[in-house]
Amino acid sequence: MAVATNELQLPQDAPAGTLLRVRDLTVQFPAGRGRWTTVVDGASFDVGAGESVALVGESGSGKTVSSLAVMGLTAHTGGRISGGSVEFEGRDLTALPPREWRTLRGTGMGMIFQQPIRSLNPAYTVGDQIAESVRRHLGLDRRAAMARAVEMLELVQVPRAAERAREYPHAFSGGMCQRVMIAMVMACNPRLLIADEPTTALDVTVQETILQLLRDLQEQTGIGLLFITHDLAVVAELCRRVVVMYAGEVIEEADAEDLFYTPRHPYTAGLLASIPHPGRNRDRRLTAIEGRVPVAGEWPPGCRFRERCPHARSGLCDTTHPATIPTGDRSTARCLRTTEIELQGVQQP
């Protein structure tokens, strides 16, 4: 079956003050016998200086792979950037030499991950690990670097920072390990922080403290934040803009308030409907999106969400692959029926 393509495209110009500009990013991984499978397919999004942007989607949507591409880490996991551009402060990073990447990852941007204990070396104290990063990127001597490490542990509110800097990772809880990782990233004064599911492995009360810490750090330092998550409830507390991914594509982007109250893509509406609201609609079953995200390399023709979409129309959604269309000021959606259907967002208070 021939599949048509809507010709409308995302505007190429980024707004003034853009820190990170990703355009038409395509990332592939080897599939054996010389073949490559596309995992991220033409993703585009921006992060402004001092702006907090959420990259949202289910497992398999391509959000983490996109962030690894931004950090120049796809080759480390066997992948490659096969198309598009990643610009940081106006500089295209896709052809950057490895040595320059290592410098940029310390002083320009940094990343924290879902399970921080795996990012810490159990054989070294947390103070030594932070100090090593500072010495490498800022050129400080050993004593000054350790003083900086203690200063950063105090900044992320680790109690008795000078004492705990001499302890090993196993002595820290999951939440404290995440604070240590944030301290390590912030020690070299980056302009962009990428946080990949940083609260998923933590209990609810610890999640809130980490989110508040990120808010405080952003307010104090003006750092840009790219927050990767599957949890829209967390997004509501932290981010001003939201980029939603599905099956390797960006399918909606909008200011957080607009997206929560007036979603323009059925997938986004489904994610919002699945958020539990304690004390409300107790007699109703929780809403779920039926089916699963299609596997990379097995994306269906037409709209990739159509097999799970309650608004899919035969003869249209199965034959035409939707392009990104503008739906407002700096907001877009990848849906052929976005102007025809009414979608339910979060109920306004």
Image (cartoon, rainbow, N blue to C red):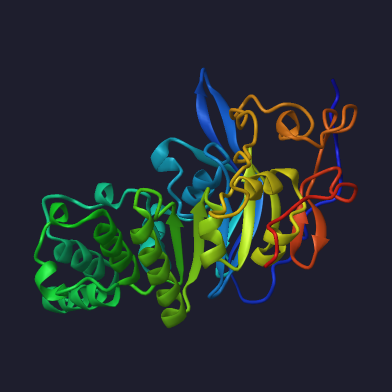
Q: Quadrant of residue 246?
A: top right
Say if residue 12 shows up in the picture: no
Lateral position of residue 280 relative to residue 158, left or right: right
**x, y percent for residue 294:** 62, 29
Which residue corresponds to the image point at 44% horizontal and 53% vertical from the top-left? 196
Q: Is residue 101 visible?
A: yes
Residue placed farthest to the bottom in the image? Answer: 220
Determine whether, in the image, residue 57 is placed left or right of residue 159.
right
Q: In front here: 67 or 165?
A: 165
x then y, percent, for residue 52: 54, 68
Classify 81 as above or below 219.
above
**Considering only vertical position in the picture, is 66 above or below 184?**
above
Front in this rendered view, residue 138 or 47 = 47
In percent of the image, x 75 and y 48: which residue is there? 265
> Quarter holding the C terminus?
bottom right
Residue lying at 17% horizontally and 62% vertically, measured from the top left: 126
Residue 127 x, y percent position in the rendering: 16, 66
Q: Quadrant of the N terminus?
A: top right
Identify the image quadrant of residue 108. bottom left
- Find residue 29 and report its horizontal and vertical position in percent: 51, 32
Above or below residue 138? Residue 179 is above
Left or right? Give the position of 135 relative to 335: left
User: 203 left or right of 146?
Assistant: right
Q: Which residue is situated farthest in the front direction here? A: 283
Is 348 in front, or is 169? 348
